[in-house]
């Protein structure tokens, strides 16, 4: 293989590092998006036998948003292997213990169940807040788009924007604003 | 038989020709062909007929091929071909007619000498891409080379429809232009 061909090979199969902001995102839908990048199936050169998966760095996993009443209804099952070793953990309990676990399990379940799964999971880096170690952040060279808009609270708007917003109606005389 | 089992015994290959044979010039790959037959036995009748009628013409048309005749008593006839790359091919001609042998000799003459294997692809090119191979950086905005991550604009989802807040603000702007409301 000539030098030019060798460099070509490096460029084509070089691993990218993608950054994904999980703030206010559904972890189950996000896992559907992230799994393509971990497996490399978003690339035109994808082939199941070639190792072309990318790294994905997920930040703000503490601020994920489960839909509906999933925080109370979603249950994570674990069995230690011993008699009576079964535990059922609710999503909010698991999130309180480790706020990266829900997203990690969602991605793990969405990935193909073959021998490559553990290696692909090793390329997924999840951080509960937006603090990323410099060793990881220096590799990041692209960003994944969020799936839905992050809602903005009233107290996050500047005071003058709130003040200048058009007044739609007048409160009744007897209305008490607490 | 599955492909895995087939490959275990027979292998697979890509389309290839020895030394780009047939591009610009053609080099006869068949070097030597041996006709083995019996002079008396009935199973060699077609082979004897071929030797009487066709063999002289075959040797005249293909001067690069060494032709051997090997009579042997009471054994079934066969063709043995040897090729430029060292490959060999053996074909049993037991009870074959003259016409069959003509076809098999033509088959041996046009072979390359490589073993017959399953082709993984039915085409081959030395230049797989004119525009160059794909890399992750193709069609990427060069601005990301000097970007400091995370970037809000690259992360936020695209706004597909107007929110109620946007509608209200838009109505308000229209009213201000038409002078219906007092802006102060």
Image (cartoon, coloured by chain):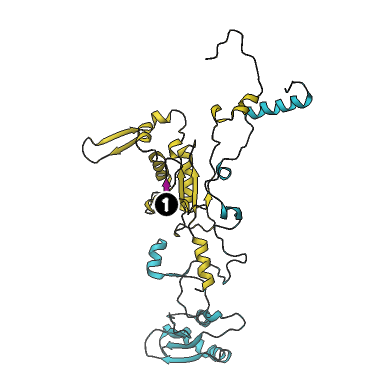
Chain colours: A yellow, B cyan
B104 or A52: which is nearer to us? A52
Q: Which corner quadrant of the image does residue B131 belong to?
A: bottom right
Q: In which quarter of the image is the C terminus of chain B?
A: top right
- In the foreground, B127 or B64: B127
Reply yes or no: does residue A161 show up in magenta: no
Q: Mark 1 lies on which chain?
A: A
Magenta segment main secondary structure: loop
Write down the region rendered in magenta. A124-131
Residue under label 1, please give it: A123
Q: Position of residue B94 (x, y in %)?
A: 42, 80
On the question of residue A111 being in view, the answer is no
Residue A162 image position (x, y, % from top left): 61, 26
Q: How crowded is mark 1: few (under 14 residues within 10 Å), some or many (20 or more)?
A: some
Front one among A14 and B40? A14
Counting the numbered discs, the total is 1
Give the answer, above or below, for where A156 lies relative to A141.
above
Which of the image's four quarters has the N terminus of chain B?
bottom left
Above or below for A57 versus B96: above
Instruction: Residue A130: say if magenta.
Output: yes
Seen at 57% across and 64% down, the residue is: B133
SS label for mark 1: loop
Considering every residue shown, the one lying at the far right of the view is: B178
Q: Which of A48 and B57 is in front in this view?
A: A48
Left or right of A91: which side holds A166? Answer: right
């Amino acid at each position: 293989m000539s030098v030019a061909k060798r460099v070509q090979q490096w460029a084509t199969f070089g691993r990218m590092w993608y950054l994904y902001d999980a703030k206010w995102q559904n972890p189950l839908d996000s896992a559907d998006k992230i799994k393509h990048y971990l497996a490399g199936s978003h690339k035109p050169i994808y082939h199941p036998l070639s190792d072309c998966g990318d790294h994905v760095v997920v930040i703000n996993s503490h601020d994920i948003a489960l839909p509906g009443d999933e925080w109370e209804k979603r249950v994570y099952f674990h069995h230690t292997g011993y008699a009576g070793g079964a535990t059922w953990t609710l999503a909010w309990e698991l999130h309180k213990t480790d706020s990266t676990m829900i997203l990690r399990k969602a991605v793990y379940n969405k990935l193909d169940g073959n021998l490559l799964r553990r290696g692909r999971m090793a390329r997924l880096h999840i951080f509960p807040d937006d603090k990323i170690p410099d060793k990881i952040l220096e590799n990041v060279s692209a960003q994944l788009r969020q799936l839905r808009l992050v809602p903005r609270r009233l107290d996050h708007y500047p005071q003058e924007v709130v003040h200048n917003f058009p007044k739609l109606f007048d409160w009744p005389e007897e209305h008490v604003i607490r | 038989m599955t492909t895995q089992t087939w490959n275990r015994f027979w292998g697979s290959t890509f389309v290839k020709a020895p030394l780009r044979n047939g591009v610009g010039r053609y080099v006869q790959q068949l070097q030597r062909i041996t006709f083995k037959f019996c002079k008396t036995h009935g199973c060699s009748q077609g082979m004897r007929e071929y030797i009487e009628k066709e063999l002289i013409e075959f040797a005249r048309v293909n001067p690069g091929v060494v032709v051997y005749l090997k009579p042997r008593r009471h054994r079934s006839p066969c063709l043995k071909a040897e090729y430029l790359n060292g490959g060999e091919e053996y074909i049993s001609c037991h009870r074959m007619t003259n016409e069959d042998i003509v076809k098999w000799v033509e088959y041996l003459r046009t072979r390359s000498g490589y073993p017959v294997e399953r082709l993984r692809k039915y085409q081959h090119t030395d230049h797989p891409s004119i525009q160059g191979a794909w890399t992750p950086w193709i069609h990427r905005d060069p601005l990301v080379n000097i970007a400091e991550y995370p970037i809000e604009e690259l992360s936020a989802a695209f706004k597909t429809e107007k929110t109620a807040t946007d509608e209200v603000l838009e109505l308000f702007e229209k009213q201000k232009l038409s002078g219906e409301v007092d802006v102060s």
